[in-house]
Amino acid sequence: MATTSLEQRAVAVLREDQERVDMLRAADVTMEEIDWLWPSWLARGKLHLLAGDGGTGKTTLAIAMAATISRGGQWPDGSIAAPGNVLVWSGEDDIADTLVPRLAAAEADLERVYLVGDVVRVRTRRPFDPAQDLDMLMVEAERIGPISLLIIDPVVSAVLGDSHKNTEVRRSLQPLVDLGALLDCAVLGISHFSKGNGGIDPLLRVTGSIAFGATSRVVLVAGKPRDGDERILARAKSNIGPDDGGFGYRIDLYEGPPQASYVAWGSPLEGAARDLLSDQPGYQNESAAETVREWLQELLVAGPCEVAALRREAQVRGYAWRTIERAKNTLGVQSRKDGADGGWRWLMPREDRQHRQSDGGGLGGVGSAET
């Protein structure tokens, strides 16, 4: 009796109504570039997370992004957004007195922004539930036309089950990931930071399971300094592009009527999210900041130090660079560049340096050089 081949046995078992695994040979796949709405920040077909402490204006930030896309405006890095439609669902803010006024204050094209309302059936209505109503949202989105951005606030509402269990979070977020892929739009979920976890990786501060950050292709974090009005938006993770850098921003008030908050973008920032947020409440306490100031002062009274050497030493000691920059400003440290091709050096004001040296103060500098 002839032996039946594996392929023949498989065909004999498989029926038209049965499921099967779709196999793709790598050689048959056409490679594609990431389609960015905001280069390195928002990508079509991908899930993004925006998290931060209360008071950082996370929803206002998301509205600013929606407004920029709706009108084809300019991003804070100078790039231009392609105009597109935006869907916004919020389980926390009222549409009429909060969301639309914020969109107007951000100069959105209101014709291109669609607010997700209740689920209606003949004579009844109920609140939209991201955990079970995404199929209906898909139908409405296709009626609208091409969608560029979908905002879900808060993203934990999409979780059907325990938001602290990895398996349940991953399973619940998958329909949201699939929806973004089907609509070819960026999905931006908004979340909060947990309290009392100062000094650790911002990814680990996202409320709930670590699966929120793991499932998202890009994680953005927002922070608010102890003093001053400028906040920080930073990239804490990206699987598809750069995973550092950020922008300063302020939350300003449009007087209206009606009054509404909006984002005023500031300067670009360099560095990892943990360093950029290091001077936020809960990250670096005052004693740590004082330690950094004393360390920097003791180095510089011995003479100017190369910035590159200071960075290396700070990394070894575990000091955040933004904390060092704050100490620099507090001490009145000056910056000087040695010629056109030379590096930057920091030095104390001459009078203070001479006074400390006459008292015998100072340590051997890191990369120090007297002028």
Image (cartoon, rainbow, N blue to C red):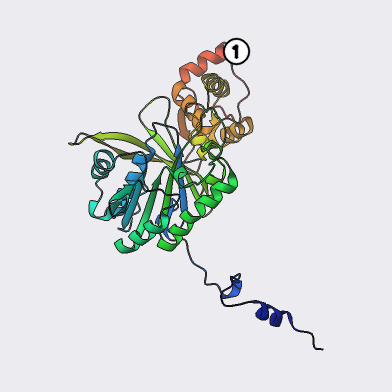
The answer to whether one can see residue 186 in this image is yes
Q: Does residue 260 lie above or below 87 as drawn?
A: above
Nearer to the camera, 325 or 349: 325
Q: How many numbered discs, if any?
A: 1
Which residue sits at x=31%, y=57%? 85
In the visual, does 260 lie left or right of 170? Answer: left
Which residue sits at x=56%, y=15%? 357
Q: Quadrant of the N terminus?
A: bottom right
Taking the view exactly as shown, the residue that stands out farthest to the right is 1
Which residue sits at x=57%, y=10%? 359
Q: Does residue 60 lie above or below 366 as drawn?
A: below
Taking the view exactly as shown, the residue that stands out farthest to the top is 359
Element under label 1?
loop
Taking the view exactly as shown, the residue that stands out farthest to the bottom is 1
Counting from the top left corner in percent of width and height, residue 167 is at 59, 48
Counting from the top left corner in percent of width and height, residue 239 is at 54, 53
Which residue sits at x=51%, y=33%? 194
The answer to whether one can see residue 145 in this image is no
Counting from the top left corner in percent of width and height, residue 69 is at 32, 53
Specify few, some or many for label 1: CA neighbours under 10 Å numbering under 14, 14-19, or 20 or more: few
Instruction: Identify the residue position indicated by label 1 in the image.
Output: 360
